[in-house]
Image (cartoon, grey):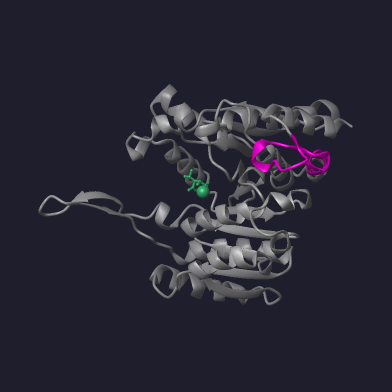
Amino acid sequence: MSKKVAVLPGDGIGQEIVAEAIKVLNVLQSDFGLSVETENGLIGGAAYDAHGTPLPDQTMDIAREADAVLLGAVGGYQWESLDIAVRPEKGLLGIRAGLGLFSNLRPAILYPQLASASTLREDVVSGLDLMIVRELTGGIYFGQPRGIRTLEGGERQGFNTLVYAEHEIERIGRSAFEIAMKRDKRITSVDKANVLESTELWREVMERVAKDYPEVELSHMYVDNAAMQLVRAPKQFDVMVTTNMFGDILSDCAAMLTGSIGMLPSASLDANGKGMYEPIHGSAPDIAGQNIANPLATILSVSMMLRYSLDEAEMADRIDRAVDSVLDGGLRTRDIHSDGMQEVSCSAMGDAVVAALCS
Ligand code: IPM
Ligand code: MG
């Protein structure tokens, strides 16, 4: 029986980049014997416009029934003034929580071909291979109580709550240690344990989980220092595990080390390995509709999906090799363009990956 993939392009450049990823998936089906069924759904602003909610029940049903979800991006200027409860981002947070996708893997790998595209010196970033494991369904993103209240006297106050229960810390810890076991066996747990009790507990639970993985070396770092170390000497890290919000921030920072956020895929996994795959960049409304976005992060997300959720490692390898050879050939979208390279559009980049797959 063929596996099912829910395809949720979302908003902004989400439409364009997912279209390129689907080209790649289609050619794996037509020419290489891959068998998957896809079903499209609406999420984010597109879903709000059609149904008045950023996460329609129908989309959740499609996602629940699928073996994996491929997502583009959500959000855009036209929805920014909406009530926070129906903003596009709520759709993304809702599907993450609804599917129980607590473990978000955000690899930051520097393609040697792009070393000169990074804003950091080549010797600082070349050879970079870092995995950020971000807790995705807890912390301040979901903690209650939250809101904006009016104080006595009429002044308004915004408030959010950073909460982590032991089981939430433990499961993301285990997820990170399992990944470290397949890598260089070093984990840096990032917290703010000197100020925040919730991350004091985070640190304690990480120490406890570490006892089950004696081969893995665990160290702790405060988030401010981690941000500094990421740009000072990023190659010191193997796996970083951290909270939802710290992971959001540090993963953008790590992405830039690799030259462009347009290159990086991510996987969000539940306890059974079912996953949602998406580029780590957003919907980039400023360049939407211009056919200049970089589709590689989404194409590489398809590769991660094949590897982690669909048990098709060989297909994933094909995609990875095709992307490599396109970069070798000097093709670059605008975000990764540098002197001497050939600038191509989003769709031309997708076509080039397809051509490389078939060559
Ligand atoms: C990300 C994004 C999302 C997040 C937004 C769009 C809600 O920045 O996936 O990193 O903050 O998690
Ligand atoms: Mg982010």
Asked whether residue 5 is in view, the answer is yes
The residue positioned 50% from the left and 67% from the top of the image is 223
Q: Quadrant of residue 62?
A: top right
> Tag count in the figure?
0
Q: Which residues are magenta?
A: 318-342
Image position of 84 (left or right of 112): left
Image position of 158 (left or right of 166): left
Return the x and y of residue 143 as percentages of the image width and height.
37, 55
Return the x and y of residue 221 as percentages of the image width and height.
54, 72
Residue lying farthest to the top in this orientation: 50
Q: Nearer the viewer, residue 281 or 104?
A: 281
Residue lying farthest to the front in this orientation: 339
Return the x and y of residue 114 as percentages of the image width and height.
74, 49
Is residue 297 rendered magenta in the image?
A: no
Image position of 335 (left or right of 164): right
Asked whether residue 271 is in view, the answer is no
The residue positioned 42% from the left and 40% from the top of the image is 90
Q: Nearer the viewer, residue 102 or 184?
A: 184
Which image quarter is the N terminus in? Answer: top right
Q: Nearer the viewer, residue 358 or 62?
A: 358
Return the x and y of residue 252 as percentages of the image width and height.
56, 52
Q: Nearer the viewer, residue 100 or 73?
A: 73
Is residue 319 rendered magenta in the image?
A: yes
Q: Is residue 177 above or below residue 270?
A: below
Q: Is residue 124 above or below residue 108?
A: below
Residue lying farthest to the left in this orientation: 153
The residue positioned 89% from the left and 32% from the top of the image is 359
